[in-house]
Image: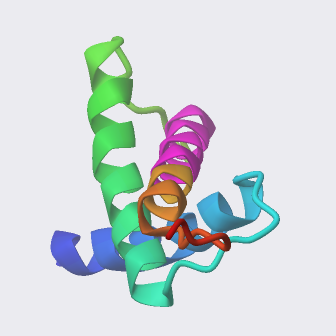
Amino acid sequence: MEIIGVIVAGIIIGLLGKFVAPSHRDNIPIWLTIICGIGGVLIGWFIYTAFGGDGSPGIDWVRWIIAIAVAAVLVMIAAAVTARSRSRVL
């Protein structure tokens, strides 16, 4: 059941990360955005626990903000890696 939660959270966090990422020509496919979101959730959780985060009762906003920030960075990296240059060198 936890895997389904990570996938659903990854979809939402990936879309939020894509929204937060500063890019005027963000043209990565939606499946790559979802993968970046899932990576953001997993890496964000790891960073959160590495710095002493142990959860809190209710919604843990710090963990979700870290996940969104990590997903935004992953979206920017994916956009840079998959970007197509407009000018061609002959």
Locate residue 70, reporting x and y percent: 48, 42
- In the image shown, does 51 or 43 lie closer to the viewer? 43
Left or right of 9 in this view: 64: right
Which portion, as a residue range, is magenta? 61-74
Q: Is-magenta flag for residue 65?
A: yes
Locate residue 25, reporting x and y percent: 74, 71
Residue 47 falls in which quadrant of the image?
A: top left
Q: Is-magenta flag for residue 25?
A: no
Locate residue 62, reporting x and y percent: 58, 32
- Relative height, residue 35 to residue 53 (above, below): below
Q: How many marks?
A: 0
Q: Residue at x 49, y 86 (%)?
A: 29
- Relative height, residue 35 to residue 63 (above, below): below
- In the image shown, does 90 or 48 lie closer to the viewer? 90
Quadrant showing the N terminus:
bottom left
Q: Residue at x 47, y 74 (%)?
A: 33
Furthest residue in direction front, as rendered: 90
Q: Main secondary structure of the magenta part?
A: helix
Residue 18 falls in which quadrant of the image?
A: bottom right
Left or right of 58 in this view: 26: right
Furthest residue in direction bottom, as rendered: 30
